[in-house]
Image (tube, helix red, strand yellow):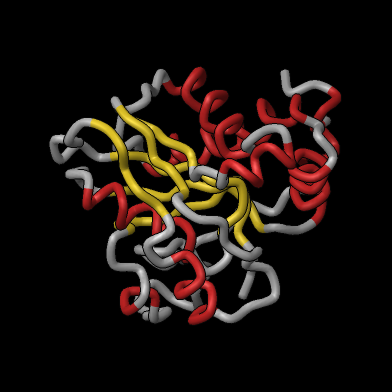
């Protein structure tokens, strides 16, 4: 039972992303043959999938979760991600969250993606790879900028610190995906650390 943190009526108003989706980035496209152009900018990230559109109850829930400290929403939101992954097929047993810079995490008090990853791991029996993905420098917020700016803003902003990842596939968890720039930069760091395919998974997708 989801409970009052994301009630039944709210769940019924969530718009799940509908096929056809871009096979790589998961954006809604006009037909299965449509090329959305993501391959030119998403090179390290093998695939990106989101549970729902960033609108309605999901947008409200994520705003409250991320900016107002409603941490108990991590469970219901992770359940949406788990449902999407069941449909997709689970491609990995390792999961890791998009990290915040230490200064941002101190300010917010928690990393929302980390909370989602923990809840998702409970539901799907995922484990954490031996090491840490870190954000090596603070970056300005991505909101309000175009794709090129976003890619440049987070390029080389992440680093894998830990054992070689032995070509193992990894699920990379975030709350919201827009252009996929942050997930791409994280995936590049994981691939440099020796991982196999990196699949990005988010609760919601912004339509751009």
In this orientation, which residue lies closer to the viewer: 162 or 173? 162
Instruction: Using residue 136 as the reference point, say whether residue 70 is left or right of it.
Output: right
> Where, by quadrant of the figure, is residue 47 drawn?
bottom left
Count of numbered circles in the view: 0
**Image location (x, y in percent) of residue 114:** 55, 33
Counting from the top left corner in percent of width and height, residue 18 is at: 56, 59
Which of 81/104 is in front?
104
* Residue 65 horizontal/vertical position (percent): 76, 38
Instruction: Residue 112 in the image: state x and y as whole percent.
Output: 64, 38
Taking the view exactly as shown, the residue that stands out farthest to the left is 166
Look at the image and tell me in which quarter the C terminus lies: bottom right
Residue visible at 79% across and 48% down in the picture: 63
Where 81 sits versus 201, above or below? above
Q: Residue at x 25, y 40 (%)?
A: 169
Q: Nearer the viewer, residue 15 or 49?
A: 49
Residue at point 58%, 41% (across, down): 102
């Amino acid at each position: 039972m989801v409970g009052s943190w994301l009630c039944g009526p709210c769940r019924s108003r969530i718009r799940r992303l509908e096929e056809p989706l871009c096979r790589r980035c998961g954006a809604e496209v006009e037909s299965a043959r449509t090329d959305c152009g993501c391959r030119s900018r998403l090179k390290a990230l093998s695939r990106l999938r989101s549970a729902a559109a960033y609108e309605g109850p999901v947008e409200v829930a994520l705003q409250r979760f991320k900016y107002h400290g409603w941490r108990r929403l991590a469970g219901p939101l992770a359940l949406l991600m788990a449902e999407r992954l069941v449909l997709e097929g689970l491609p990995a047993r390792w999961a890791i969250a998009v990290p915040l810079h230490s200064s941002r995490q101190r300010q917010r008090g928690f990393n929302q993606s980390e909370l989602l990853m923990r809840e998702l791991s409970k539901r799907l029996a995922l484990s954490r790879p031996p090491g840490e993905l870190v954000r090596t420098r603070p970056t300005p917020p991505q909101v309000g900028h175009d794709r090129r700016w976003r890619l440049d803003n987070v390029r080389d902003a992440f680093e894998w610190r830990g054992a070689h990842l032995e070509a193992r596939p990894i699920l990379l968890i975030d709350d919201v995906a827009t252009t996929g720039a942050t997930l791409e930069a994280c995936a590049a760091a994981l691939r440099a650390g020796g991982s196999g395919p990196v699949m990005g998974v988010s609760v919601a997708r912004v339509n751009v």
